[in-house]
Each structure stands twice: as structure tokens, then as C-alpha cells.
Amino acid sequence: MSDVKYFHLYTGKLDENAYIVINGDKGFVVDPGGEEQAIIDIFKGAKARIEAILLTHAHFDHIGGVANLVRLASIDENGNEDSSLAPTVFMHRLDLDKIGSYKNMGFSMGVKVEKFTPDVLLQGGETLNIAGLEVKVLHTPGHSKGGVCYIVKDKIFVGDTLFFMSYGRYDFYDGDFQELKNSIINKLFRLKGNYTLLSGHGEPTTLEFERRNNPILTAEETPRAVD
């Protein structure tokens, strides 16, 4: 098997982390919030095809580039559209309502997300085979009802569930502090062994470090403002 290559791009107004994983002549993208042409160029440079797009959740900064990336990836070497080249888009079913509505939070930054239709709606608990790699899906609601983490080899793409010495906001539409805390402490932290955690924003961290140091361990919910 070829060595797996990882790439990272900052995208959009919030410097969202988009990740690229390439295994030989195929690969996938996690949370393409933008920079679609740069993503295409990385795959072309590696002589690889985008087999899938994996979304950790459907807030605007994580899905903003999906529609155009699918369109660009569907162009063959002669400049013609070939639908067989289109990457498969995976997303949890509980975030479907966010794609084309205010619920993706794009309005807060003056961003309108181009609509797209996910090909596979996840439930959580699946083990996918993408680009010759095993991808385990862990449902981690709290920041978003349909939030998921993707476990790939020794890395976990955690979206906005968990950050270095921090954790995701829960004051957006369908966010929930207790669900977030449960997702982190009783799902992520109970995984055996150590992993590199690749978050939707900020720097990488490790599961072992966050098990010992993340403030979610002792955090209590901050009361929501009441108008």
C-alpha cells in the first residue's frame, strides 16, 4: 500500500481547517469550507482522484466549498463534465436541514452557501472504506446535532467538537452542552490508545493530552441569554 499523505488548508473567513487525505491514486477531503481550486491542484499534483468528501457537520464554514468542489472534480482531462468522477459526499442525517437554510449560520458572516445534496446520510457507527482506507464514523452531537468525528488510522478528524484545550460552542441552533460533554468524555475520551486530533479550527492536539487537560472535564453549562 502507498504511504498515506495528509494536507491541510485554511479556508474562508473563519480560517476553517480543510484536510486532504491521499492514499495512492485516490483520496478524500474533510470539510472543504473553500479553496476548491487549491484542493483540486493538490490532487492533480499527486495524480489522484477525489473519491469522497466527508463533512463533520453542516455549518457554513465547513461546507461552503462542497458544491463547487464536486463540480470541479467532475471535469475530466479534456475539460468535459463526467458525472462518474464526482466525489461521494457523506454527512450525518441530522444536519441535513442546515445545508440551505439559516441554520448553517452563514448569515452571521454574510455568507450564502451554495446548495448541494449529500450522497450518503450517516447514522453514526459506520465503518467506511474510502480510498483504500478504513474510516470509522463516531456520532458526536453537541456543537451540532449531526456532528461526527472520522477515525482514520492514528488520526481523528473531530470538526468543532473538540479543540486544543477547548471544545465546541453549543449556543447555536440545535447545540447542546450536555450532549457535547457526553460526546467528548464518554465517546472520544473512552477510545483506546492515543490519536492525533485534527480540529475544525486551530492547531492539532492529541487525545491523551486532552483526556488529561481539556476544560470540558470540569466545565458547567453557561446559562443562555434570555431576551
Image (tube, grey):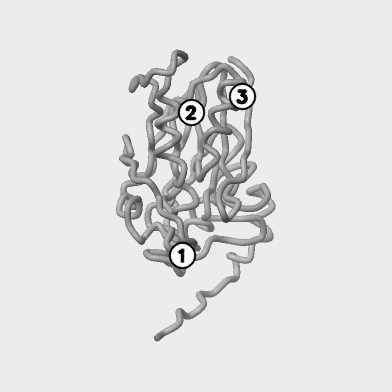
Whichever of labels 3 and 1 marks the residue nearer the N terminus, that label is 3
**Residue 216 versus residue 161: which sits nearer the camera?**
161
**Residue 196 versus residue 97: which sits nearer the camera?**
97
* Residue 119 pos. (x, y %): 31, 35
Residue tagged by mark 1? 108
Whichever of labels 3 and 2 marks the residue nearer the N terminus, that label is 3
Marks 3/2: CA–CA distance = 12 Å
Q: Residue at x 32, y 57 (%)?
A: 101
Q: Residue at x 61, y 21 (%)?
A: 45
Asked if residue 194 can be seen in this view, the reply is no
Asked if residue 18 can be seen in this view, the reply is yes
* Residue 186 pos. (x, y %): 49, 56
Residue tagged by mark 2? 134
Residue 145: quarter of image:
bottom left
Q: Residue furthest bottom?
A: 227
Number of labelled discs?
3
Question: Is 107 placed left or right of 94 in the picture?
Answer: right
Q: Residue at x 62, y 40 (%)?
A: 9
Q: Amino acid at mark 2?
A: Glu
Marks 1/2: CA–CA distance = 36 Å
Q: Which numbered mark, 1 or 2, is in the foreground of this view?
A: 1
Q: Amino acid at mark 3?
A: Val
**Residue 75 versus residue 143: which sits nearer the camera?**
75
Quadrant, the N terminus:
top right
* Residue 32 pos. (x, y %): 50, 41
Residue 153: quarter of image:
top right
Examine the rendered structure and indicate whether residue 193 appears above or below residue 164. above
Label 2, secondary structure: give it. strand
* Residue 208 pos. (x, y %): 66, 49
Within 10 Å of disc 1 (Cα), the crowding (few <14, some 14-19, many 20+) is few
Residue tagged by mark 3? 4
